[in-house]
Image: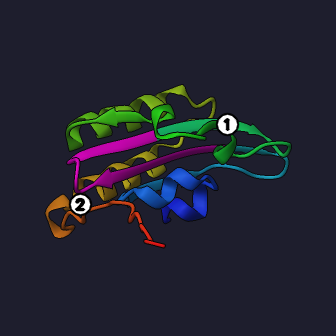
C-alpha cells in the first residue's frame, strides 16, 4: 500500500516512504491495522498500529510524521511486529509468520533515495 492511499494529509507528499508490510484485521464495524514503511533517504523504517470503529480510521491517528514510531533496522521493525501480534486478543500465528517473512524479504537496497524538496518560485515584476 502506498502512504498516500492510507494517510490523507498534505505532509505525505513530502515523503519518499516505500511500503514494507500492511496488516488489516478489520471486519464489520471495527478495524485493527499495522503498517510499516521505509524511507530510503533517511534509511529508517516508520511503523504504526491502531484500532477503532467505523467512526474513524487509521488516518485519523497519523496526522503528522511525528505520530509514527521509528526503527533503525529490520530487526527492530520485526520486534515491533511481534509486539503487535502479541497484543492481539485472537492469536494469528500463521499471519504473524507471513508478515515476518515478508518483512525479512524486504530489500531496502532496491530503493534509491530521492531528494524530496519543495520548489519555490520567485517571479520578478
Task: Point out the residue furthest to the left here.
Answer: 109
Q: Percent x, y for residue 70? A: 34, 34
Name which quarter of the figure residue 72 lies in.
Answer: top left
Q: Percent x, y for residue 41? A: 22, 54
Magenta-highlighted residues: 32-47
The secondary structure type at the circle numbered 1 is: strand
Task: Point out the residue furthest to the front here.
Answer: 125
Name which quarter of the figure residue 16 lies in.
Answer: bottom left
Q: Is residue 34 magenta?
A: yes
Q: Percent x, y for residue 28? A: 83, 52
18 vs 77, nearest the viewer? 18
Disc 1 crowd rating (10 Å Cα; few below 14, some 14-19, many 20+) is some
Disc 2 + disc 1, Cβ < 8 Å: no
Magenta stretch: helix, strand or loop mostly: strand
Q: Is residue 102 magenta?
A: no
Disc 2 crowd rating (10 Å Cα; few below 14, some 14-19, many 20+) is few
C-alpha separation, residue under disc 2 versus residue under disc 1: 26 Å
Q: Nearer the viewer, mark 2 or mark 1?
A: 1
Give the colouring mode of the picture: rainbow
**Residue 51: image tag:** 1
Q: In this picture, is 89 found above or below 109?
A: above
**Residue 105: image tag:** 2
Q: In this picture, is 115 found above or below 57?
A: below
Left or right relative to 25: residue 18? left
**Residue 11: image tag:** none
The secondary structure type at the circle numbered 2 is: helix
| Residue located at (29% from left, 53% from top) | 39
Q: Percent x, y for residue 105? A: 23, 60
| Residue located at (46% from left, 43% from top) | 93
Left or right relative to 29: residue 78? left
Amino acid at each position: 500500500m502506498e502512504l498516500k492511499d492510507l494517510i490523507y494529509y498534505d505532509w505525505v507528499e513530502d515523503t519518499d516512504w516505500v511500503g514494507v508490510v500492511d496488516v488489516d484485521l478489520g471486519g464489520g464495524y471495527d478495524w485493527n491495522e499495522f503498517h510499516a514503511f521505509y524511507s530510503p533517504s533517511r534509511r529508517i523504517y516508520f511503523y504504526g498500529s491502531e484500532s477503532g470503529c467505523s467512526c474513524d480510521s487509521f488516518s485519523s491517528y497519523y496526522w503528522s510524521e511525528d505520530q509514527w514510531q521509528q526503527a533503525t533496522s529490520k530487526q527492530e521493525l520485526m520486534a515491533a511486529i511481534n509486539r503487535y501480534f502479541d497484543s492481539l486478543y485472537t492469536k494469528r500465528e500463521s499471519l504473524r509468520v507471513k508478515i515476518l517473512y515478508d518483512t525479512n524479504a524486504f530489500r531496502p537496497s532496491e530503493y534509491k533515495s530521492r531528494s524530496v524538496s519543495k520548489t519555490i518560485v520567485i517571479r520578478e515584476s
